[in-house]
Amino acid sequence: MDFRIRVPDSDDYTKHENAYCEHLKQFNKRSNTHLWKFFGWDFFHDGVVKSIEVQDDLRTVVVRLECPNIKRFKANGDYVYLNIGFACTFQNVTLLNIEDETPEHAWEMKKYHTIFLDAEINTSPILKGFPPEDERDSDPHYSLLIRMLADDSIIWLELIFSQVNVVADEPAAFALMESDPKFDVPTWPGDKEG
């Protein structure tokens, strides 16, 4: 499996990222706001994937991971990165696909943590089978394709779902970080800013 627009290892990375940004501009970001806020940019880049759990209803998937990209500025202008844990709950999941691209030489698996690399929103061709957002009686569907690194292998996780809710392990502390200028919280700022 590969991303359908982004090509992270391309010689022309900027061209693919620009195409992906153009792709994202066509979507209404006022619905499913956590999808855009936390996955519009790679907020979780290099974060440890703690677990992926399918709930009892078989239509809810919870991905627990860390964001290592929040900066706390010190008084002298330096900064430190913080690791903040999150639970991403995907609801009304109609597709869950996991593919492992293990190289032939990989033999000692689970030596290291699984790392979130990057993601791509709404590029699944399966979405074309759903009615357009303005013609639906039910919740619209979205897709998310996530690339992860597990030891020497690349793991692809693809989901089609109607809603994602992202909650910090410590919600009050995270809300304070978002409002405090001593912290840089790199969530999606909206189309106006990028």
Image (spheres, helix red, strand yellow):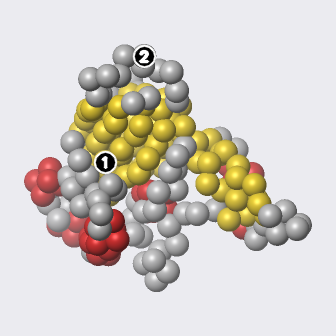
Q: Residue at x 14, y 50 (%)?
A: 126
Using the image, tell me which numbered label, if any, was put on residue 81.
none
In the picture, the quarter occupied by the C terminus is bottom left
Residue at image position (50%, 51%) is 45
Q: Quadrant of residue 151?
A: top left
Amino acid type, callout 2:
Glu
The residue at the far right in this view is 75
Q: Residue at x 41, y 51 (%)?
A: 118
Query: Is disc 1 surrounded by few (<14), some (14 to 19) or many (20+) residues within 10 Å?
Result: many
Measured as percent of width and height from the top left, residue 58 is found at: 32, 28
Disc 2, disc 1: CB below 8 Å? no
Which one is nearer the viewer's eye here, 51 or 140?
A: 51
Q: Name the one closer to the observer, 138 or 181.
A: 181
Q: Position of residue 138 (x, y in %)?
A: 25, 55
- Please tell me which residue is depicted at 50% across the width and 67% down the height of the picture: 188
Q: Which residue is mark 1?
A: 145
In the structure shown, which secondary structural element does the residue marked by tag 1 occupy?
A: strand
Question: In this rendering, does residue 151 appear at all?
Answer: yes
Measured as percent of width and height from the top left, residue 47 is found at 54, 43
Mark 2 lies on residue: 108
**Would you say 32 lies left or right of 135 here?**
right
Q: Amino acid at mark 1?
A: Leu
Separation (CA) of disc 2 from disc 1:
26 Å
